[in-house]
Image (cartoon, rainbow, N blue to C red):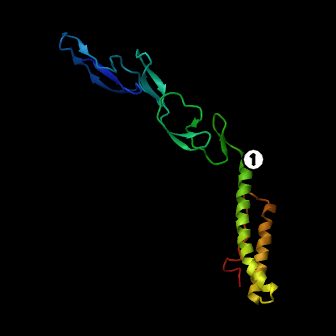
Amino acid sequence: MDAPTIYHADPFNWQFCGTGTADPDPVVLGNWLVPARAYLDAPPQAEKGYAVVRNGDQSAWELVEDHRGELFSTVTGEPLLFLQLGPLPVGLAHEPRPGPYHHWDGQAWVLDSAAQQLGLRQEALIQRDERLVLASMRIAPLQDAIDLDRATESELSQLQAWKTYRIELGRIEQQTGFPTDVEWPPSPEDDHLLP
């Protein structure tokens, strides 16, 4: 008589982990020894997204949802390594968060257009303010030269260019594409704009 095939279960999560053959019982002729966490009944064929696991009372094999691997927090969008078998826990998603203005609606990531517009507006205004600070730093010594009647023609021209630039920066919110498509005015520091 051929040794029967046995089906092993992992000792930690009871997942099917391979086959073997039973050893003959040295005491009782015709009897076979089945080690702990091994079973004579064959497991079902695994399906995509499921793992074959021994059930809670160890009486049969069953298919259990398998979401192990990289998942994503539905709160922060951060990737997480998920290692457990079973249903997908609340707060985790298979798909990465597409962008900072998406939120989880319980089923999928959804773009929050209002938040996106607000975020893009804030980003554009931060960039504008950084450029305004630079322009003001460039204007200050040029204005000092004019105030003290010590400005050269080049300094007068530079001051005019920087003040014009600063005015144009202050008007970006009036652009039709703001805040999505901002057309930034060229800086006087660009080689072709200063004398």
Q: Position of residue 133 (x, y in %)?
A: 72, 69
The residue under the point 80% across, 66% down is 171
Quarter of the rendering containing residue 32? top left
Quadrant in the picture for the N terminus: top left
Query: Residue 1 vs residue 71: left or right?
Result: left
The residue under the point 78% across, 70% down is 168
Query: Residue 93 vs residue 150: left or right?
Result: left
Quarter of the rendering containing residue 188? bottom right
Question: What amino acid type should be assigned to the residue bearing mark 1?
Answer: Ala
Quarter of the rendering containing residue 160? bottom right
For the residue labelled by badge 1, is the local secondary structure a helix, a strand or a loop? Answer: helix
**Rendered view: 185 above or below 35:** below
Q: Position of residue 191 (x, y in %)?
A: 66, 80
**Rendered view: 13 above or below 71:** above
**Rendered view: 3 above or below 119:** above
Q: Position of residue 95 (x, y in %)?
A: 57, 40
> As rendered, which of 58 and 193 lies closer to the eye?
58
Query: Residue 191 vs residue 82: left or right?
Result: right
Quadrant in the picture for the C terminus: bottom right
Residue tagged 1 = 114
The residue under the point 79% across, 59% down is 176
**Rendered view: 138 above or below 12:** below
